[in-house]
Image (tube, rainbow, N blue to C red):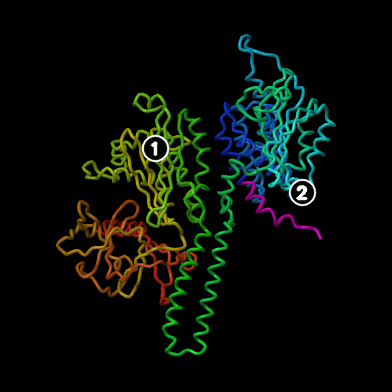
Amino acid sequence: MAIDMAQFHQVFFEESFEGLDIMENGLLNMDPGAVDDEEINAIFRAAHSIKGGSGTFGFTDISSFTHLMETLLDEMRDGRRAVTNDAVDALLRSVDVLREMLLAARDDGDADQERVQAQQQELDKILTQASIPAAQSASVDADAGKQAVQVQEGWHIVFRPLPQMFRTGNDPLRILRELAELGDLQVEPDISMLPPLASYEPEDSYLSWNLHLGSEACREAIDEIFAWVEDECELAVMPILSNGRLQIGKDVSKPEQDKAKVPVVEEAPAISDRRMGDRRSGTDRRKGDRRKNATSAGGNSIRVDIAKIDGLINMVGELVITQSMLSMLGDDFSMDKLERLQEGLIQLERHTRELQESVMQVRMLPISFTFSRFPRLVHDLSSKMGKKIELKMTGENTEVDKTVIEKIGDPLVHLVRNSLDHGIEMPDERIAAGKPETGIINLNAYHKGGNIIIEIRDDGKGLNKSKIEKKAIEKGLIDSEHNLSDRQIYELIFQPGFSTAEAVSDISGRGVGMDVVRKNINELGGNIEIESEPGKGSAIIIRLPLTLAILDGQTVKVADETYIVPLVSIIESIQVKEDQVKRVVGRGETFKLRDEYLPILRLHELFNIENPKATRLEEGLLVVVEGDGRHCGLFVDDLLGQQQVVIKSLEANYQRVEGISGATILGDGSVSLILDIPGLLRLADRIDEEALKRSA
């Protein structure tokens, strides 16, 4: 029976996108002057896996394209070609093209063939250029300024089997015999790992070898011999030049060994070390940790750490035990069993709460899935703008709900681009201001009070308060006699169409961004704030709920209706007297809270609720809330209590209602609406504007 390979496509695409992340991050971190062998090996393995998988599943165009990248990477890691900035940039562009090809294949679309062919031609051009090995380029004669290319005379091989090699049926002696068929082989055993006789395990391998192969055989011929044991050994293969020196690498033999048999190793910035034994060394181990709980971008699947699944299974087992106990109590219930029934119900409540928390943990992913796109963004845009910018990221392992991960990416991209464009100055400006020429952007995430906080901070010039004021007056957003605080002035940049950019660019400055950023964050149940200090930098602080499925809320009563106010929006609850309230014509009621006048929103008036319990302010309560950077007081009859509620989409089950973000079912079976504070403020503004028009 034929196997339907399409069932494995989703896993292939998820693995491939993770591989692209490994490649992109590795290339961004690569320093041509000091190449990290583990890094370049990790990049090569990622490309090799994508090539193999795409060939297996019939994506031949992807396989062919990746083969070119793999070939270039192989020459770099073996030292046959020097690592240059041009080659790294070409590989980064190739990663972009490969990502587009994979997305097109996943979505049954067509990739941009012109771009694919242009990138293939660029890779072909690099590969057809004369290879200049890294070590060879460093071994230039100091006096003459140049040196003739040395002829390769053989290979120096370090072969270290892992202890379990014999158990898989492989024999190192057969490998040595095959190598000897390629040329003159000198074998030098290393017995330093032999244990005392009492600790000796007959089935374990303890020997390793330094091998000198005098042969013109190509690297592929040597790799083919070791292919059968690539997961069971550590291997280093280094070409030897005609001057008796290794082309690249370092001397890996023991100090006490006879150096006359081993070529002198030429100092070089990189080591051609093919570590096959531990395929998860270095970067792979770090990626492996991250992949314990992973998802592909925009995908509909999620990988979960097995420990989380085990926790769920254990918790379901506890629930089954509790359910069984309660069933037994119900079979022949009597009042003397009441205490056990109460204990069982308490136990059921505890297990249900723990199960809820465990289930929510399954959806939690590290914010690094969003942060991973920014090193490339900063690298490309800083080069384009001629700025020197360093990106520092902390808190990448902070976990947040998968839905939040998917929706926060675009707002963060816009904010980071703003820091790059408007925040960080040009190098000469920074030097003139007494700053280092390299600007710093800090991207940080952490948990606080049941929320996730994301901060984008830069050490640039800060927001220009006078320019924002001038532009706001021009647009009629404020008058020249305003009495706004610095924070309120900074908040003006979130107004639709607001921009202080003097020229439109493809990076920012069209005035169609910050209002959308705030809208998207509000839709996630979060809020955004600005801090800025002239000449020292700015900070954007985003507060988001950890999950969009569960909400911590305050229940409030208005007449016979119960509403949920998100706790994240509540500042405090107070009771005011009538003489504390000021009435502004066309602007409704306001009250002074410390140094700020806040509008009062009567919920029964906004939602046309009849017969509220409280109509006079001293009869009810004001819940001071924040939304869109503004504060107001919600007038309600009473506060009932705080509780966690499960959010249900009102739009999906009924229709969109302004000022309402969703609904939930309370413990008594009744439905309660969840208030959308920014939406309520917009609704109140519109009602005030309509009232002004009618009065005019």
Name the N-terminal-most of marks 2 and 1. Answer: 2
Estimate the x, y position of residue 252 in percent, counting from the top left: 66, 30
- Vertical placement of 355 versus 244: above or below? below
| Kind of residue at badge 2 | Thr
The residue under label 1 is which amino acid type?
Asp
Q: Which residue is mark 2?
A: 168
The residue most toward the front is: 198
Q: Secondary structure at mark 2?
A: helix
Q: Main secondary structure of the magenta part?
A: helix
The reply to whether residue 122 is visible in this rendering is: no
The image shows residue 227 at horizontal and vertical percentages of: 76, 40
How many other residues sit within 10 Å of disc 2, few (<14), some (14-19) or many (≥20)?
few
Residue at (77% x, 58% y) in the render = 3
Q: Report x, y in % for residue 44.
A: 66, 38
Disc 1 element: strand
As for residue 256 lying within the magenta part, the answer is no
Q: Residue furthest right?
A: 181
Stretch of the chain drawn in magenta: 1-17
